[in-house]
Image (spheres, coloured by chain):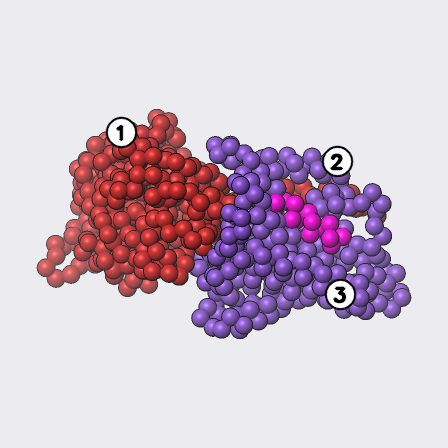
Amino acid sequence: MIYLQAFVDAVALGTLFALVAMGIGLVFGVIRLVNFAHGELLTAGAYALLFTKGMPIVVRIVVSLAVVVALSAVMEVIYRPLRTVSPATVLIATFAISFLLQNAALLAFGTQGENVEFLTELNKAFVVGGLRIRWITVVGLAVGGLTLAATAWVLRRTDVGLQMRAAAADVQMARLLGVPVRRVVVMAFLVAGLLAGVVTLVLAVQRPLITPTFGFQVMIPALVGVVVGGLDRLVPAALGGFAVGFATVMLSSLLPGAQRVFLNTVLFVLVITILLVKPDGLFVGRRRAVERV
Amino acid sequence: MRKRPKLFLLIGVFALVVAACGGAETAETTTTTAPATTTTTKATTTTAGEEPAAPEEAEPILIGATIDLTSFMSPFDAPAALAAQLLIEDINAAGGVAGRPLAFEAIDTQVDAEQYKAGAIELIQKGASVIWVTCDVDFPTPAIQEGLNAGLLTVAPCIGTDQMGPKRFGDAGRLAFSFGNMAQDEGAAMAEFAIDQGWMRAAVARDNLLVYFQNVADAFAKRFEELGGEVVLQENWTNGDGTIGNVATSLANADVDVVAFSTAFDDLPGLVTGVRSLGSEVPMICSWACDGAFWVPEGLNEFYYVTYASVFGDDPSDEINDLISRMEAAGSKPTTGGFVGGADAVKAIAAAIDATGGTDGASLADFLENMTDFPGVAGPISLSAENHTVFGRPYRVIKITDGKHAVVDVRSATSPADIG
C-alpha cells in the first residue's frame, strides 16, 4: 500500500514536470533555443495570482495567463537578435535573463514569499481502495493530457502548426518557401507561454508559497527531464519530464529513511547513465525523427 | 545536424551542473554582483531625564557587520541588524560603554563570498572591535575567518546550530558566538511542550537541507524519547527535492499524537497543506523556522511553533513589544521573532566590554563563555565554553488557530538535548 501511495504521488510530480517540459521542448523544437528563463514565466504568473488575491477566481486565472503569455512574447523579442549566434552564447544569454528576472523579483518583492491561497480545495483528497488521491493530481493529469493533445492538434491540424513544423525542420528552406518564420517563432513562444501559464495554475495549488525562485525550482528538473526524454520532439520531452518526476518520488520511497539524503545522487547517476547509453533521449525511437515538434 | 550531439552535451552538462548545485539559492549567491552598500549608525540621542550621552570626542567602539540586506538572507539579517542599532541608540543615550559610544556599520554582502571577505577586511581596517555576520555559518565563513584571524570577537545574531565556535573553527573559534537559539535547545523545548500536552506518540519529519533543521528534529526525537514518548515514524527528505507530497501523505497516514519537524521555504506550506488536506488534524509542532504569518494557509489549526518572541502583539515582555513598535516606526516591522538575537548580541557585547574594560577578543570571549542567565530582551540566556550558541532562552510557544497566532506558553528547555 505504501508503494501504491508513492505511485500516486509520483504520478502527480511527474505530470507537473511533464507540463513544464512541454513548454521547453516546444521552443527548442522550433528555434533550437533552450530557454532557461522558462521558469521565470511561471514565477511571473504566480506573482500575478498573488497580487490578484481576493479577486474572483476567473479574473485571477485570466490575469495570470495574460501576464505569462505577455512575458513570453517579450522574451521572444529579446532573444530575436541572438538567433544567429552560437548555441553556447544563447544558452548563457537565457541563463542571464533568468537570473536577471529572479533578482528583480527578489528586490521588488523580497525573499520571504507569501501564501497565494489559490484553489486550495483542490489539495483535498478522496479515498480509493485505501489510497488518498488529491484532486489536484487528477486535475494535473487531465490538464496535462488535454494540453498535450491540444498542442499536438495545433501542430498537426492547423496552418500555424504546419509552418512551425516546417521551420523546425529547416528554417532557411521554410523561409524560401514563403513560411513567415518570424511569425512562426512568435507563435511558438506564445504557445509555450500559454503552457507555462497552465503549469503555473497547477503548481500554485501544490506549492502555494510564492517566492522569486518559484518557477526556477521546477524548471531545472524539468529541463533534465527534457534532455533525458529527447530534446528533439514534444512527446519524448514531456515523457522525459514525467520520468524524472516519477523516479524522484519512487526512489524516495524505496530508499531507507536515513539514506534519502542521497536521493539526488542516485537520481543523477541514473540520468547520466541514460545519457551515456541513449544520448538522443530515452523516448526517441531508433529511427531518428525527421520532424522535431 | 552534426552540431546536435555537442549541443545536447552542452545543455545536459549545464542542466546537471545547475541541478547539482542544489537549487536556486546557491545559484543566487554566485551571480549576485551588485556593489556593496554600507550603512552606519552612531546614535547619540539624549532625552530628558536620562544620563548624558557618551562624549562626542570619545572614539566609538565599532561593531562591523558583513550581512545581507537585500538578498535571500535579508529576512534574517536585516531585522536583527535594526534591533541591534536600536539597542545601540539606547546604550549610547545612557552614556555608552566604558565611556565610549557604540557604532554599528553594515556592509551589504548580498550573500556573496567575496563580498564577505572584502567587507570584513574593510571593517577591520576601519578599526572594528567586533565582527558581526550573517545568520548562517557557511555563507559568511570568509568574514568569520577574517574576524577570528584578527583576534576579534565574531558574532552572529541568529545562527541556530552549534557551529559558530570551536566545533567549526577549532581553537580560533573560541572567539565566535551566536545569539540564535541552539537547535538542540529548541528541539528539546518542543519535545518537553509536547510531552506536557500528553502527546506520547510522535512522527518526526527531518529536512536534510540545513544542519539546523536536522538538529532540531534529532533533538526533539532524543528528548521526546528520554521523557517516555515514542517516535513511531521518522520521515526524511531534502527541501526542494520534489518529494514533499509523499512525505505529507506518510505523515497524514501515521497514527500519532503529534507531528514534529523543522523546515522552511517552499516545502513548509507544502508539508502543512499536504497533511491537512488529506484530512489529518493531528497537532503539528515546529521550531523558529515556522515563525511568521506570510506562509500560513487560510484556516490552519492545531499548529504550534517555538520562537524567540511573538510579533503578533501579545508577547508577554513589554521590552519586546516596545522594540517591535520602534522597529515598525523605523519602517521595518519584524515578521518573525528572530530580531531578538540582534538585540541580545548588542546587550551581551556591551556587558562584556563593560566587565572587561576593553575590546580584547579573548577577554570578551572569556566573559561570554561564563555568561549564565544573562538578562536578554526576551528573558535570560546562557552561553558556555561548550555551547557558543545561546541556550536557555524562554521560548514563546505560539499556537495557530484558524490562521491566527497566539502565545500559549513561555518555556525554556531544561537543557539542550545531547545529540552527539
Q: Is residue B413 above or below residue A193?
A: above
Q: Amino acid at mark 1?
A: Ala
Q: Which residue is mark 2?
A: A277
A155 with respect to B28 (left or right): right
Q: Name the chain letter of the residue that bears numbered label 3.
A: A
Q: Residues within 10 Å of mark 1 (few under 14, many from 20)?
A: some
For the residues labelled 2 and 1, the Cα–Cα distance comes to 56 Å
Same subunit: marks 2 and 3: yes
Tell us which disc is closer to us: 1 or 3: 3
Q: Name the chain letter of the residue that bears numbered label 1.
A: B
Quarter-of-image position of residue B133: top left
Q: Which residue is mark 1?
A: B385
x and y, in percent, of residue B86 in the image: 26, 55
A245 with respect to B300 (left or right): right
User: In the rendered structure, does residue A234 fall within the stretch colored magenta?
Assistant: yes
Same subunit: marks 1 and 3: no
x and y, in percent, of residue B419 in the image: 35, 30
Tint of chain B: red
Q: Which residue is mark 3?
A: A154
